[in-house]
Amino acid sequence: MKVKRNKYESRRDFVRKAGKVLVAGPLIALPLLLSKKTYAKEYVWQIDPFKCTTCGNCKTTCVLTPSASKCVHAHVLCGYCDLCGGYLKEGAKTISTGAEVQMCPVGAIERRFVEEPFFEYNINEDLCDGCAKCVKGCKDFGNGSLFMQIKQDLCVNCNDCAIARNCPSQAISRVPADMQYRIKDRI
C-alpha cells in the first residue's frame, strides 16, 4: 500500500534539502576558490624621481610617522665630493660632520672618508624622515644622486595615498609591484 504524502510535507522536504545545499555549497566551494591563483597585477605607490620637485610634502602628508618616503642614494651618479650639496648646508663656514653644517635635520646621512678628496655618503633609512632637504641640495649643487622613493616594506599601500593627493608635481603614481622601485641611473 502506498503512503500518500500531503503536498506540505513534500515542500518541507524540499526546503530542508535546499537549505542543506545552501549551507554546504559555499563550504565546499570556498577552498576551491581560494586555491585558484589570480593573475591580476598588484600595484603600489611610488615616486618618479624625474618629476619630484622636493617640496617636502612626503614628510608632512604621509599617514605614517616617520614617512614611508625615504631618501635613496644612487652611488653610480655620485661624485663623492668633499663639498656635497646634499650633505652640507649652503654657505656652511666649515666642512665637518657637525650637526650645525649638515643639510639633514635628523642626521640620516652618514659620511665616510674614502681618500683625499673623496667621501662616501650613505642614508640611514631608520633616521630619514622624508623631508627631502638633502635631495634638493643634491639637485641644486650636486649630481642629483640623492632622490626620494617610497619604501614598500614600510608603506601601508593606502587606497588613496595622501602623499600622492598632495604632490604638486604629480610625481607619485601607482606602479606594478614587480617594478616597485624606480632606479635613478641617469641625471
Image (cartoon, rainbow, N blue to C red):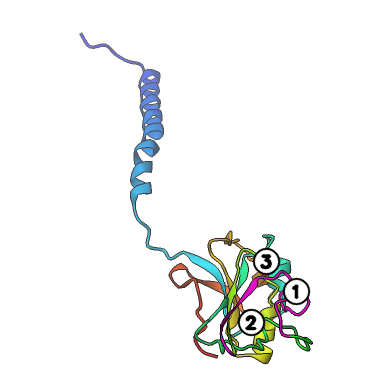
Q: Position of residue 9 (x, y in %)?
A: 38, 18
Q: In front of the other: label 3 or label 1?
A: 1
Residue 140 among those drawn in magenta: no
The C terminus sits in image quarter: bottom right
- Magenta segment boundaries in residue numbering: 95-116
Q: Is residue 1 above or below residue 118?
A: above
Residue 96 among those drawn in magenta: yes
Q: In front of the other: label 1 or label 2?
A: 1
Q: Secondary structure at mark 3?
A: helix
* Residue that mark 2 sits on: 52
Magenta region, main secondary structure:
loop
CA separation, marks 1 and 2? 26 Å
Foreground pick, 181 / 128:
128
The single residue placed furthest to the front in the displayed view is 116
Residue at image coords 62%, 79%:
171
* Residue that mark 3 sits on: 162
Circle nearer the N terminus (2, 3): 2
Circle nearer the N terminus (3, 1): 1
Residue at image coords 63%, 66%:
161
Circle 3: is it few (<14), some (14-19), or many (20+) Cα within 10 Å?
Answer: some
